[in-house]
Each structure stands twice: as structure tokens, then as C-alpha cells.
Amino acid sequence: MERKRLIVSTQLMKFHPLFLFFLIASLSLQALVAETAPRENLPAATPPLIPVATPTPIPAPTPSTTPKASPSPSSSPSVAKSRVKKTPKTTPKQEKGKIDAELLKQAATQPLSIVISLCKQRVYLMVGEKIAVDSPISTGKKGHETPKGEYMILEKDLNHQSNLYGDFVSEKGAVVKKGVSAKIDTPPAGAHYCGASMKFFMRLSLEGMGMHAGILPGYPASHGCIRLPLEMAKAIYTTITVKTPVSIID
């Protein structure tokens, strides 16, 4: 706009010199008024608001409800030992003996023989080729193993007592010490040796090995003899005769 005015004024100066004077004075006055005039109160430019990110509150950790694992017994040897229950020792079960009464009736007319199996812990009374008595047994324990071999019945003694193994008893008959050896142990004062009872004894050797009624714990436990249940020992004892052959095998 000012430029247009100047162009017009310049063109007018060509026509009247006095006009130049008034033009300059007018322009000067306008400039003065513009400088002294109060400026309009324009609102100051405010910087744009930058949104400040408010921190998201972090929830406080809640205690875990998962129960703490208790230490296993294996982590503490003392605890483990205290918790382990000792299982009582059980006697191994042996199959009960069998007696064929009808076959035993033929014993007087048939050849008799006895077979003893150490690994099976069984004794068999044979009438001919058949088994008349099948019984569990207990043979010699470690260190006193029953020897294998071929034998025969040398003697029969209904109420035999061992001259090697037994008990020390007092004068009144009370047992002072059980399971002694007549060759090794010495009886205390006032006591004497009493040989172990071996009812229905059937001798196999001069050293004292034989078959007789006794305790069967389910494993080899004797000092070399062959123990049988009382009923089975009686059945064999009353059937066989002296010189009946006996085979002791694995």
C-alpha cells in the first residue's frame, strides 16, 4: 500500500513542486504518530502445552501365597533316618510238605530211596520211582554246609540227643546258655551240657550228620544236619529202614 502511494506521489511531483513539501511533511507526521501510538495489547504467544506423562503407579508386590516347599527327607540324613521305618525280618515261606499215604502203603514191596536237594531245600522219599513224601528242610548254614554225596541210613534213634551242640543248663533244669558247642564252650559253675533234642534221628555219617525233626526258619540254618518238620520226620522215620540209600544233591 505504501509503495502504491509513493508511486502516485512521485508521479504528482512532476506537476507541482510545492506538493513535494506537503507530501514529505505528511509522511513524517504519519511516521511520528505510528511510533508514539500505544501498541495494541496482543496476547503473548504462549508456548504449546506439552502433556507431561504421569507415571503409572506400580502396584506393590503382594506376598506369594504359594507355600514354601518343605525340605525333603533326603535333604537331611538325620530326618530321613528317623522317618524310615524298619521293616521286621520275615521268615521266608516254604511250601508245606505233602504225604501220599496210599503210596506209603506200597513201601514194603517197593525199593526206597531218599533225595535231598540243597538248592530247593527239599527232601523226597521215593517209593520206587514215585514221590511218597515231599517236605521242606533246613540244611547246614555257611561254615557248616551239608556235604553233597551218596550216603545210607546208618542208624535210627527215636529220641536222639546231639553230643556236639546243645545248651548249658542248671541243676534245676533251667537253661543258662543256649546254642553251645560241647567241644568249644565251657559250662559255668553249677551248670552242665545238655545235647539238643533230635527226635526221629536218622544218621548219615559217623561224624554225626543226620536227618531229624527240628526248627525250619526258611533257609539253611543247621550245623550240617538236615532238619524236617516233626510230622514229615516221623513219616520218613517210620517208613525207611537202615541201609536205605540217600543222595544229597545241589
Image (cartoon, rainbow, N blue to C red):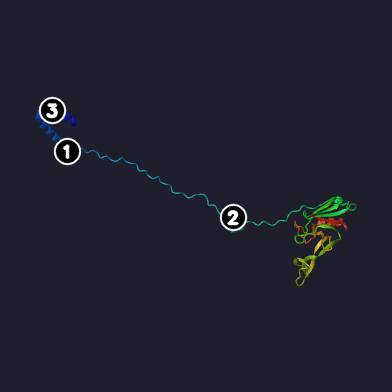
**Is residue 202 shown left or right of residue 42?**
right
Outermost left residue: 18
Q: Which residue is mark 2?
A: 74
Q: Residues within 10 Å of mark 2 (few under 14, many from 20)?
A: few
Amino acid found under the numbered disc labelled 2: Ser
Regarding mark 2 in the picture, which secondary structure is present there? Answer: helix
Marker count (numbered): 3
Task: Please report whichever mark, 3 or 2, sits nearer to the chain's N-terminal start.
Answer: 3
Frontmost residue, 214 versus 17: 17
Amino acid found under the numbered disc labelled 1: Glu
Task: Please report whichever mark, 1 or 3, sits nearer to the chain's N-terminal start.
Answer: 3
Q: Residues within 10 Å of mark 1 (few under 14, many from 20)?
A: few
Q: Residue 133, image x and y in percent?
A: 83, 53
Q: Are the residues at dot 1 and dot 3 in contact (C-beta closer than 8 Å)?
A: no
Separation of residues labelled 1 and 2 (CA atoms): 99 Å
Q: Residues within 10 Å of mark 3 (few under 14, many from 20)?
A: some
Q: Quadrant of residue 207?
A: bottom right
Outermost bottom residue: 189
Q: Residue 196, image x and y in percent?
A: 79, 64
Q: Which residue is mark 1?
A: 35
Separation of residues labelled 1 and 3 (CA atoms): 27 Å
Separation of residues labelled 3 and 2 (CA atoms): 119 Å
Q: Which residue is mark 3?
A: 12
Task: Please report whichever mark, 1 or 2, sits nearer to the chain's N-terminal start.
Answer: 1
Outermost top residue: 15
Position of the N terminus, as image quadrant, is top left
Of circles 1 and 3, which is in front? 3
Amino acid found under the numbered disc labelled 3: Leu
